[in-house]
Image: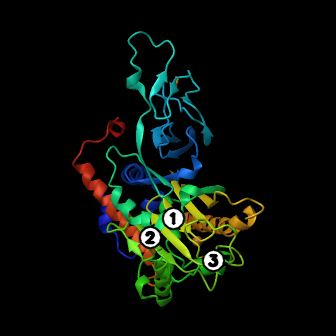
Amino acid sequence: MRAELRARKRGRTLTRPFYVDPAFHALDLEQIWYREWLFAGHDCELQKPGDYFTMQVGEYPIIVARGRDGAIRALHNSCRHRGSRVCSAERGSATRLVCPYHNWSYELDGRLLFARDMGQDFDRKQYGLRPVHCESSSGFIWICLAETAPDFAAFRARAEPYLGPHDLTLAKVAAQSTIVEEGNWKLVWENNRECYHCLPNHPELCRTYPEAPTVTGVENVVKDPLIHEHWRRLEAIGLPSRFELSADGQYRVTRSPLLRDAVSYTMTGKAAVTKPLSDKISEPNIGTMMMFHYPSTWNHMLGDHAVTFRVLPLGPMRTQVTTKWLVHRDAVEGVDYDVAELTLVWNATNDQDRRIVEENQRGICSPVFEPGPYSPVHEGGVMQFVEWYCAASERALDAAVSRPLPTRMSA
Ligand code: FES
Ligand SMILES: [Fe+2]
């Protein structure tokens, strides 16, 4: 990988092994997915103590649960007896986490409470479920599998002023979908980071979402007069709006207007939900607040709802994308919104993107594939993603040289 990274030409796609090789994928897991902060789900999905959901990051099954004290924690979902997954359901509610194999029972914070007939000398304190770093910020739950997690405070400080006004802690998930795309996770991101493909592929989305490179990309945003006017108007009502990209390129927050007078991602551009998402924002036309955070999430916050996306790698050429539509907690289905209307545009767009990514993957699998040039006009966002990925991978490779291999890999 190091040789491929050194030899790569900027402004072109990565070389074939990055998209097809299982050994490269294993490095992506070690160097990116097991190291960075990842979006797990939303606080509002865990309303009461005992509510939990599970997820799988590479080899690691994880439980995210709200404890009796109200705090949200993440735990490794691997029993300390003989290793069974403790929770197999996708989500649920429990007073204790009880392993189905021999009924070892854990407190919601991971402490082992009960293990039958383990003998006099057995010390329960030694066998709690292992913790995973977990943070909650403006209604988003983040986890990190690394032993020492990277700094979270800088992201929190930058993103909370943008996300906070949308009040996602007081929202509810009105609908969700999980799809599997037969493509490498980086192809899913490359596709997400440009709208060069939008006009020919996304008739529904293009009714309201501007395909302008200043909206999706990272260059020339500040030169777009329409966006400037949008920022001026929204900052005047107390919504931070300006384009902000972290120094290392891992995350971005910004606001953008939708096309014409559209206020939501619907076929008409009208709101899909009559009750605004947030009690804190009375202005209906706020466009979209967009936040991406590599490698696991991109998001849109609108006046009437939010749509959030979680990316997880399932294999070298397989990626899971989970989409959630959030509305105000008090919005009533069938009265304030219709689920089919709420989800139409992004369900269609997700399916179109899935096909694009799968065709992209099939073509890259050809032995004649060689890196092609990105459009300097439309694909600045893709190049920015690739630069972040390459820099993050190089940093991790350098760090690996100076530390011993983890036991798991040296076996
Ligand atoms: S493996 Fe969990 S109780 Fe035995
Ligand atoms: Fe797309």
Report crowding for label 3: few under 14, some 14 to 19, many 20 or more residues within 10 A (C-alpha). Answer: many
Q: Which residue type carries mark 3?
A: Val
Q: Nearer the viewer, residue 251 or 96?
A: 96
Q: Earlier in the sequence, mark 1 or mark 3?
A: 3
Front: mark 2 or 1: 2
Image quadrant assignment for residue 263: bottom right
The residue that mark 3 highlights is: 263
Provide residue 312's location: percent of width, then percent of height. Answer: 51, 53
The residue that mark 2 highlights is: 253
Contact between marks 1 and 3 (CB within 8 A): the answer is no
Query: Which SS class for mark 2?
Result: strand
Q: Which residue type carries mark 2?
A: Val
The residue that mark 1 highlights is: 298
Q: Residue furthest top?
A: 120
Residue found 46% across the figure and 26% down from its top:
112
Provide residue 355's location: percent of width, then percent of height. Answer: 63, 66
Query: Which SS class for mark 1?
Result: strand
Q: Nearer the viewer, residue 29 or 134?
A: 134
Q: Which residue type carries mark 1?
A: Trp
